[in-house]
Image (cartoon, rainbow, N blue to C red):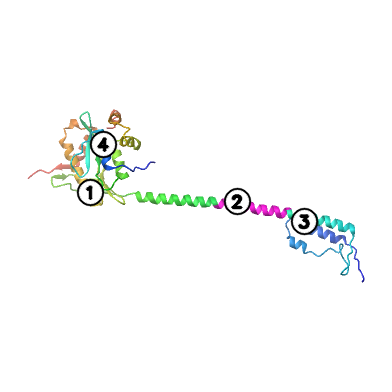
């Protein structure tokens, strides 16, 4: 299994902000909602972190809150996935009554 | 000089044949075979005299030559056998070394994985802040890693990270409070299925304290 390393907190936060439109409120952690068709669907927390990389345990939590698998998350983080790819994924989950 | 000739005895020849046969079967060493007394039918004379019986002598020489070649073959095959055994042992030793190396690697990997495994414990929160009333203790999970502590309330997907447990718990309280206000301040028709379930859960646990 590929190890979850090399994710930088700022790049991760920016990626989620620009691609998924997540607006981080004020708080100890960067926390924001993923909104689809005016409804709050998911809530994501990206810790500000102290070191250069987000730890694999935190990445696992972020992946879980975004309802992605590791490969999908990698695609989202590294750019191949656009906001519409993610939206499609979430719409699928809503259609399956999972969200 | 007197010469005494002793006629050869058939029993001596038979004895020699038996000894050689025994040697070829591996029942005696080459040294033991060669140390046998010279048969009387070859030379049995006073010192300085050589008397032999040509027929017996030729037969003995053929026999000796056969023995030498047989011994040579046996020794060659034995040394080849020993060589093969040494080769086999060497290859066995190499495979054992490889297995030991892979065991060492596996143990190191396990140790690294154990280091990564958190110390997990469950506890409850009885207080969030002065403005909120905790109706029921809030169950939380604390994962203590080597370098950080994660406190979480998995059912509503809230977590906080810190260097130590008290700080992680304090951060988690803030996160729970923030989520509570975000949920109650958002009109219900703007909440998806998941946040609505979080709201239901959180309202069973937390309520606003009435101002005096």
Q: Nearer the viewer, mark 4 or mark 1?
A: 4
Residue A73's quadrant in the figure?
Answer: top left
Residue at which label 3 appears: B68
Q: Are marks 4 and 2 on the same chain?
A: no
Numbered disc 1: what chain?
A: B
Q: Nearer the viewer, mark 1 or mark 2?
A: 2
At 76% from the left and 54% from the top, the residue drawn is B70
Numbered disc 2: what chain?
A: B
SS of the residue under disc 3: helix
What mark, if any, has residue A16 been given in the picture? 4
Say which quadrant the N terminus of chain A sits in. top left
- The reply, left or right, for residue B147 in relation to residue B88 is left
Q: Nearer the viewer, mark 2 or mark 3?
A: 3
Q: Which residues are magenta?
A: B73-93
Quick one: label 1 or label 2, which is nearer the N terminus? 2
Whether residues under marks 4 and 2 lie with C-beta atoms below 8 angstroms apart, the answer is no
Residue at which label 1 appears: B169
Of B111 and A4, the residue lying toward us: A4
SS of the residue under disc 4: helix
Q: Give the CA distance from mark 4 to mark 2.
A: 61 Å
Residue A45's quadrant in the figure?
Answer: top left
Q: Are marks 1 and 2 on the same chain?
A: yes
Q: Give the CA distance from mark 2 to mark 3.
A: 30 Å
Residue B92 in view in this figure: yes
């Amino acid at each position: 299994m590929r190890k979850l390393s090399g994710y930088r907190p700022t790049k991760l936060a920016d990626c989620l902000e620009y691609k998924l439109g997540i607006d981080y409120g004020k708080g100890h952690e960067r926390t924001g909602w993923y909104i689809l068709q005016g409804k709050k669907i998911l809530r994501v927390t990206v810790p500000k972190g102290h070191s250069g990389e987000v730890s694999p345990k935190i990445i696992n939590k972020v992946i879980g809150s975004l309802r992605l698998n590791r490969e999908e998350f990698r695609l989202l983080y590294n750019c191949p996935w656009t906001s519409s790819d993610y939206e499609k994924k979430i719409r699928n989950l809503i259609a399956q009554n999972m969200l | 000089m007197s010469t005494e000739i002793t006629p050869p005895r058939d029993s001596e020849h038979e004895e020699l044949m038996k000894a050689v046969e025994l040697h070829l079967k591996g029942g005696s060493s080459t040294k033991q075979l060669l140390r046998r007394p010279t048969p009387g039918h070859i030379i049995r004379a006073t010192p300085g005299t050589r008397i032999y019986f040509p027929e017996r002598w030729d037969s003995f020489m053929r026999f000796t030559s056969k023995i030498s070649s047989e011994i040579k073959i046996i020794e060659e095959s034995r040394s080849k056998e020993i060589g093969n055994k040494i080769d086999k042992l060497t290859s066995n030793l190499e495979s054992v070394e490889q297995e030991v190396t892979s065991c060492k690697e596996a143990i190191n990997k396990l140790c690294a994985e154990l280091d990564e495994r958190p110390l997990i414990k469950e506890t409850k929160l009885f207080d969030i802040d002065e403005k909120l009333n905790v109706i029921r203790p809030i169950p939380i999970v604390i994962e203590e890693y080597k370098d950080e502590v994660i406190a979480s309330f998995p059912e509503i997907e809230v977590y906080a990270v810190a260097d130590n447990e008290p700080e992680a718990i304090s951060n988690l309280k803030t996160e729970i409070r923030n989520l509570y206000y975000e949920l109650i301040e958002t009109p219900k028709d703007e909440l998806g299925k998941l946040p609505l379930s979080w709201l239901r859960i959180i309202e069973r646990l937390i309520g606003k304290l009435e101002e005096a």
